[in-house]
Image (cartoon, grey):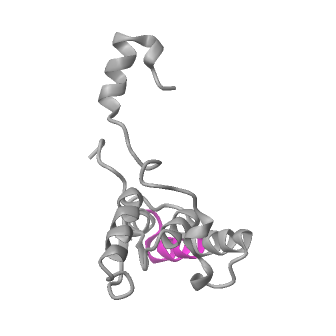
Amino acid sequence: LDTCRSSIQVLVEVVAKLKSMGLYDKVPLFVDGGFRRGSDIFKALALGATAVGIGRPMLYSMAIGGQEGVQYSIDLLGQELVTCMKNAGCQTISNITSSFVSCSLNDLQVSNPIANLYNSVENPSAAKL
């Protein structure tokens, strides 16, 4: 999974495909994987997600602090999301739109880190730092 694309990268393509098929407003779009901060949730909502899964952070919180740890994490993510929304001038979740993020499918390409490592060893001047 190290060289797989992230959930948020795939989200852009899924939204585009659903819109092209006329299904975007008919199918709820849940995304999960790699979301750790309120700003991550904001970006996923802006890119078209209906809901964002936050399973792993909650598992960590449960392991460390039980129910209180989970509640603390939920509160913290909520505060971070609200802060991000306020910074963007959004009063409600429905105010979050794609105008708050700048990306295209070309911007979201992930290179193969093994190829980059090989290139940097064979040709140090080609290393991407």
Q: Is residue 75 magenta?
A: yes
| Nearest the eye: 126 or 79 | 126
Q: Which residues are magenta?
A: 64-76
Q: Which residue extends farthest bottom?
A: 26
| Nearest the eye: 15 or 61 | 15
Residue placed at 59% from the left, 76% from the top?
96
Residue placed at 55% from the left, 69% from the top?
98
Q: Position of residue 33 (x, y in %)?
A: 37, 61
Q: Position of residue 112 (x, y in %)?
A: 32, 35
| Nearest the eye: 18 or 84 | 18
Q: Is residue 37 magenta?
A: no
Q: Which residue extends farthest left?
A: 1
Query: Is 129 left or right of 89, judged from the image as shown?
Result: left
Q: Position of residue 58 (x, y in %)?
A: 42, 69
Q: Position of residue 31 (x, y in %)?
A: 37, 70
Residue 2 lies in quadrant: top left
> Main SS type for the magenta part?
helix
**In the figure, 103 relative to 125: above or below?**
below
Query: Is 13 left or right of 79, judged from the image as shown?
Result: left
**In the figure, 111 relative to 35: above or below?**
above
